[in-house]
Image: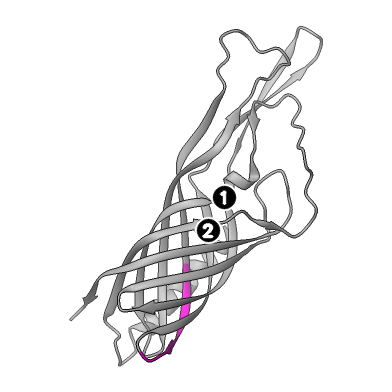
Amino acid sequence: MKLLNTLLLIFLFIESHGQQQENNKNIILIFLGAKTRITPIYLKHVPDVIHLGNINALEQPDKHLSGPGLLLSEKRRLGLKHIFSLHQVIRYDYIYQRIPLVTFPPDNFKYEIKKKIIFDISGDITRTIPLKNSFLSISVGASICGINSGYIETERVYQTQTTYTDYERKKNFIFPAITAGAGWQKSKFLAELKFGYCWNNPTLYDTPFIFPEISLQYQLFQLKKK
């Protein structure tokens, strides 16, 4: 929550600053495209196998933290060489796989994979570098990823071989990140490569990680306020 509040303050400051610019201050560019987050690079050793005991949700950290999605971006010029961008990514992705709480599952037990619509929200500031017929860009920003990834995990604790108590707890795979990247745009097409750093891993791996992201976008239109 601290990171989210900080992001909101930064975004409000940039919005206020952008309103004071004389050049291009009222131009907003709308981009639509696709983004895929590649398998994370873990910065500490992770176990080859995770033993969960009597828990009915199997985590797959690489699946939680990676995958393709639909990308919508709004870009506002902050003068001639800088752009402030807001990005929203929507994807339908893996949450967990249901596994039996006991060694021998009942006959009516169903193995299932839980998926949900997941959102990522990010913002960044970009510095553009003009070329002959295109331009390069360098960006830094921050993200909140895995919004709407919450679920309820059940753990069964046995008092005897036949008596037990089920404990439920709410969990999610929301994680913060800071990002840096580079892009290339020609006409209305934009390609970007970004790297995010997460210091608060939401999975059982519990280690910081770096995740690469690749996106392809197309400028749908631009708005100019009077």
First to last magenta residue range: 123-132
* Left-right relation of 100 to 116: right
154 left or right of 69?
right
Q: Say few, some or many: other residues with alpha carbon within 10 Å of mark 1 (under 14 / 14 to 19 / 20 or more).
A: many
Q: Position of residue 69 (x, y in %)?
A: 43, 52
In the rendered image, the quadrant that contains the N terminus is bottom right
Residue located beneath label 1 in the image: 174
Q: Say which element carries label 1.
A: loop
Furthest residue to the front? 133
Please identify the quarter of the rendering in which residue 224 is found: bottom left
The label shown at residue 144 is 2
Asked if the magenta segment contains residue 124, the reply would be yes
Position of 201 with respect to 130 (left or right) is right
Query: Which amino acid lies under the numbered mark 1 shown in the image of this protein?
Result: Ile
On screen, residue 203 above or below 54: below
Tell me where residue 105 sits by quadrant: top right
- Measured Cα–Cα span from mark 2 to mark 1: 7 Å
- The amino acid beneath tag 2 is Ile
In the rendered image, residue 218, in percent from the top left (x then y), is placed at: 32, 67
Whole-percent x, y for residue 119 in the image:
45, 51
Label for residue 197? none
